[in-house]
Image (cartoon, helix red, strand yellow):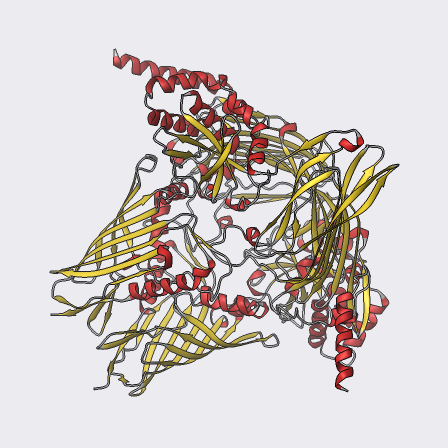
Amino acid sequence: MKKSTLILLLLCQFTLFSQDYKFGKVSKEELEEKFYPLDSTADAAYLYRSRRTYYDFIRQKGDFQLITEIYERIKIYTKEGFEKATKSIAFYDPENGEQESVGAIKGYTHTLVNGKIEKEKLNKKSIFRENKNKYTSIKKITMPNVKEGCVIEIKYKLFSPYSRSIDELRFQYEIPIKKLNYQIEIPEFYIFNKRSKGYYFVKMNQSSKSGSVGSTNFSINVFTFKDKDIPAVRNDEPYVSSVYNYRGGMKFELTQIDFLSLGGDLKTFSNTWEDVSKQIFKSSRFGSELNKSNYYKEDLEKIVAVAKTPPQKLSAIFQFVKSKVKWNGYSSKYTDKGVRRAFKERVGNVADINLMLTSMLRSAGLNANPVILSTRSNGFPVFPTIDGFNYVISMVEFDNGAYVLLDASEEFSLPNVLPQRALNWNGRKVTKEGISSWVKLNSSKHATEENHVITKISEDLIVKGLIRTKYNNLNALNFRKNNNHIKEESIISKLEETNSYEIEDFKVLNKTNLAKPIIRNIKFSSEDLIEDVNGKLYIEPLLFLTQHNNPFKLEERKFPVDFSAPWKDKNIVTIEIPKGYKVEKIPEPLGIGLPDRLGLFRYQVTQKGNKINAMSVLQFNTGMIAPQYYAALKDFYGQLVKKESEKIVLVKM
Amino acid sequence: MKKFFLLFIIVSTFSVVSIFSQKNNYSALLIPSKLKENANAVVRDNSIEITIEDVDKMIVYKRKIVTVLNKLGDRYAAMYEGYDNDTKITKLSAVIYDAFGKQIKKYSKGKFLDVSAVDGGTLYSDSRVKYIDYTPISYPYTIVFESEYKTSTTGFIPWWFPINGYYVSVEKSKYLLKNPNLISWRKKTTNFKGHEIEVNESDSEISYSLINQPAYKYENQSIPFREISPKALVTLNTFYLKGISGNYTNWKEFGKWMYERLLKGRDVLDESTKTNIKELVKNVEDPVKKAKLVYKYMQNKTRYISVQVGIGGWEPIAANQVDKVGYGDCKGLSNYTKALLDVAGVTSYYTIVYANEKRDIDRDFSSIQGNHIIINIPNKGKDIWLECTSQTTPFGFLGSFTNDRNVLVVTPEGGIIKRTTSYRDEVNLQTIKGEIQLDVTGNVSAKIKRISKGLQYDDKFYYKTLTKDELVKNYKSNVWSYNNNLEIEAYHLNNDKENIVFTEDLDISIKNYASINDKEYLFRVNVFNKESYIPKRYRNRKLPLKIPRGYKDVDEYEFKLPEGYVLTFLPEEKEIKSKFGTYKVVFKKIDDTSFKYHKTITIKEGEYPKEDYKAYRSFRRSIAKYENLRIAITKKQ
């Protein structure tokens, strides 16, 4: 008896594994499943996702095209999963130039009605083509008859004349995948680099088969990826730069096209960082843009007539470019209109601006070079691909070995204080000769905030005083970016809304004097800072600067906490106690640290006569905290919050 | 010498300006300072010229000159024009000038970007837009944007809203409507009083112009801008809408037109569906019960997908089509529901409403209005309203999306204006009852029951659709973010759709809740419903106060003190009363180691003069302060 059960079980398992996913045919088990067994919180799951990408020779054109076939079988568990029944497929569709296309779209919705499987076909009328803009079109599909528990199937083909670029393989989505089957078939003429990304890996198997065009035979390299039970990666955690960075996948970057055997050419492309950098350098929208100088000649002469020393020249040119050309919001390592037109029209993308800056610095005799990098939203540059870089800044090196990084696309940036978007690990410096090397982007400068508060408690328990706040480095940049264009009055009411005080006087210094830190002076008064319980007064030593909430509430975290720069907050508060009261109790000091000197917190409250001094320092020495420190970080903050909420107790004399 | 030099500059600046001003006054220097106050942008000269050539031919010419003073003003200089299959853009151009009125950039029609105008909630629409993506290089700058389009749809004559929101002033704005063929029309103007508007009206022409209007400043807790700003509404009595003709002079006729031309015949269902519905309500007599069954059937069968093509923007997808594919937009799903109700023998009507922001269909001015469709079931004078685009909303519940506003009910006999259900003050009730145990280390463990009704139900019933992680995160990060170390130990949610009551039973622990020292043990008594909202301070309030929503919260906690501590003192009863509502806290000692906390807060919906704002703020402030109340207990001697 027992034996036969085992055999039956084995048989079941066998059928599960060998299940062939035939389009248009789903099983009753799939329809009956109430939730995804490995993750009951999933609203939907890919029961099966397959992709086949292969090359197809087009005789009339005499060239290969790339065909990608996608087949998705999606189980929808809940109403929240309904959005998975609508799909948008974007494709390159320029007004001029070769177009991609999407075709052979087919779909079914399967439902279980009274124990019987019913299927509804996707009607052609439910497929729309939207011409999104000059470059992109979208095929939009929505499936019929979608209900909780249904299984939908969609398949389509994407035809691309751009045979040199294979879309990234994606192994992870915001919903789990039960079974995955990808196959990429590449004729021997094309050689690609294959690089994994994210925190999830799928094993690659390689084999080959033969192909032919007319009488020419060649071999085709076949790469297959099979996996099951792939977890979802959802975008719901705080302090994450881009969830895309963490999802598993594989990128393909062309390194070589070799048609020598057929009497054609051999072309090689990037395969090391050096190659990638060189290739970017060679582009007419990069390297040669650096050599153009006529357009700014007159302006530069005026600048160097005044600025004599290298640091003076640097800051004058940096200032000039920032005020001359405004950023249009687009990131790129390549120029858009070109430096000349950008200069004339006073608008450009990041490359227009920073290559212009680099060129001017060079013409002024400084040792300046462009640094190409990947922005935070573009992901880390962990392997050498051209698309891996999407931004460029400028770097000046001095004879004593010191260097500064400059980004003139950001109005409020400073030498060595780059905007947040560019603070992403390492960038690659490219010299005049096209030689490249790594440069660390993340500043070692802490983003700082210092608060000095001097207050006096009156006999009617109103707290009045002055706050002097100083922001430096990235904090100053962010302050200027967020506040400089806003009216003072709105800033005041925003502060009053978030803090328990009313502002009587307000002033910000150095708003546009970037060389100096932001200084903000506030004269305030508050009736809400003192608590009177049974005649005793309770006061939080840091007043409105007290941190009441632990920002880290979740139990665990799989990804790093990304602060984007090291930072330090310091508070010094002096409180004069009201007449007729004496101190009954003040909090004990506390000093704690995170492992590996990642961060520290120091806190001290002291009494001197009728004055109480409170001091706190919170410092993180790195912008990025790895997940293994999360528990320690959460606990660290927990202690901090607890300590800061301890109150000074005053009693009547 | 120096003086002279200075003089020269002034003179030359003036002369430059005057040369320019002969052609066009685009220099930002010419803006009167009154118009720069509180303004992020100044509309220098805005004109709309509409020519109605025939009932199916309209030409709209617009010219907009705007000086943008700072970054926040960029949005008032948006340069775009929409078009679709029966609207053709015939002119389009833009010129940008710097602060001194010098031209810096020019765009011809071909330089405009052309994209589809599909918003997030829509799958497909055939509307498109041509626009310019301009990066300002310095402030102030001025744009001159011109466009002209021809359309065969005259159902929408552009209305006049000369003030485009807060923080924008208007030097001049003009509206000119030409009707050379004297096609009969109606018009209505609102809030012209108090604004400098010149009016010229004749049988063949209307013109309005507003001059020197300073910017309005936004203030919290006030009436909607549209209730302050001037506007002019115009509509033709005979018109075309995407190739369909119509005529009406009142809501009754409008409703009849809509019924005849857009709805009739679109309610046909397949026989099999009819049989299903008849089977479903077979033994049910009560029409309300029937309607409930039908509504549930519809909710289980459909989902919301919006596709707007041609007349599809106005006409619902046929009921049998929705039945087949199982999706539709608000029109399609409402029309489908109505068709099903017809089969079940329940009378119901297609109803037009403005959804989301509370806004009435204008009772006195019949024209194409509204942005959403719901269903009305008359039910002997006690109207029932159905939202058909949600799979989870209870039967007959509207929530804040469409509650308490004038709507147009479309019957075969014509249109009728009715008002949807309102949820006032005490109806929006939340009660929390809880037992709270404190322990010697300062930890809290509590069992609470939170019950929500009315609009407070509307706020929470979606909790039921959250996953456990999302729900716990919501409690920790939103609902009780002021309680650190809060953990949900167990939960049970109940969405009683029949009675429209949402109940949450929760076991909660909070570590280190109390502050303890050698003498005392202190804790905040309002553990689970702290109302710390204080309206923003205005030194000089200008607009009336509006409390958009009333509610009542009742909290009743029974505290059990930790081992070894006794109650020495309980605060007095506290009551704060005002015309905006009441607040009351009562403590009751049970014995030496337990007591009760009872709090009631009632806030009344309403509109009050601006002078009351200060009093409202101080009312909320007193409450917020008392919500932080802590008490001290002492060690047993």
Residue A11, quarter of the rendered image: bottom right
Looking at the image, which residue is at 72% across and 39% down? A190
| Image quarter hosting the C terminus of chain A | bottom left
Can residue A219 be seen in this snapshot?
yes
Task: Examine the rendered structure and indicate whether residue A498 appears above or below residue B135.
Answer: below
Residue A254, quarter of the rendered image: top right
Q: Position of residue B488 (x, y in %)?
A: 47, 73
| Image quarter hosting the N terminus of chain A | bottom right
Task: Examine the rendered structure and indicate whether residue A18 appears above or below residue B567.
Answer: above
Question: In the image shown, does A281 or A390 lie closer to the viewer?
Answer: A281
Question: In the image shown, does B163 or A8 lie closer to the viewer?
Answer: A8
Task: Examine the rendered structure and indicate whether residue B85 appears above or below residue B20.
Answer: below
Looking at the image, which residue is at 33% across and 76% down? B442
Q: Position of residue B501 (x, y in %)?
A: 55, 75
Specify whether A508 is left or right of B210. left
Most extreme residue toward the top, as rendered? B1
Specify whether B329 is left or right of A462. right
Residue B231, quarter of the rendered image: top right
Task: Examine the rendered structure and indicate whether residue B120 appears above or below residue A337.
Answer: below
